[in-house]
Structure formats: C-alpha cells, structure tokens
Image (spheres, rainbow, N blue to C red):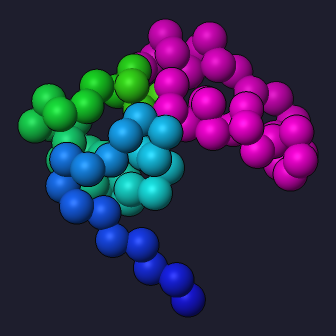
Amino acid sequence: MVVRTVAPGAVGNMDLHYLSLTELSERIVARDLSPVEVTEAILARIGELDPTLKSYVQVTSESALIAA
C-alpha cells in the first residue's frame, strides 16, 4: 500500500485528486480552495485518464461546474 503525504498548501490544482474529501472540505472552508477549483481539477483528471480507463459512461462537466 502506498500512502502519499501532502504538506498543507503544497498542492497544485492538478494534484487535488490526491487529497481526501476531508482535506478538500477543510481547504474549502478555509478559503484556500473554491468548489469550482476542485471540480475543474477533478474534471481535468477525468479527461486525462478516462480515454484509457473508460470508467465513465457520461461525464456531465457543465452540470458539475454549475453545481460547484
């Protein structure tokens, strides 16, 4: 099992997928991140990996961003 530790404040938008939902929530509450930034980063990660993994039937990016 590989565990990646991330120092607070050391995560770029493209690395947000390594954070737990608790960590993301804490950073959103502290206004270090916005829900839109998190959503954009996760959608970018899906766009990067899904052509190979084919794990999503449909990605509703626009709806996700509106909800964020």
Q: Residue at x 70, y 21 (%)?
A: 60
Left or right: where does residue 46 sit relative to residue 51? left
Give the residues in magenta: 40-68
Q: On screen, 56 above or below 20?
A: above
The residue sitting at 60% across, 14% down in the picture is: 63
Identify the residue at the far left of this view.
Answer: 30
Query: In this rendering, would 65 be left or right of 38?
Result: right
The image position of residue 7, as x and y in percent, is 22, 61
Instruction: Identify the image quadrant of the C terminus.
Output: top left
Query: Residue 6: horizontal and vertical position, in percent?
Result: 30, 63
Q: Residue at x 37, y 40 (%)?
A: 12
Q: Main secondary structure of the magenta part?
A: helix
Question: Does the magenta run of residues contain 64?
Answer: yes
Report which quarter residue 20 is drawn in: bottom left
* Position above or below: 11 against 60: below
Which quarter of the image is occupied by the N terminus?
Answer: bottom right
Q: Nearer the viewer, residue 4 or 54?
A: 4
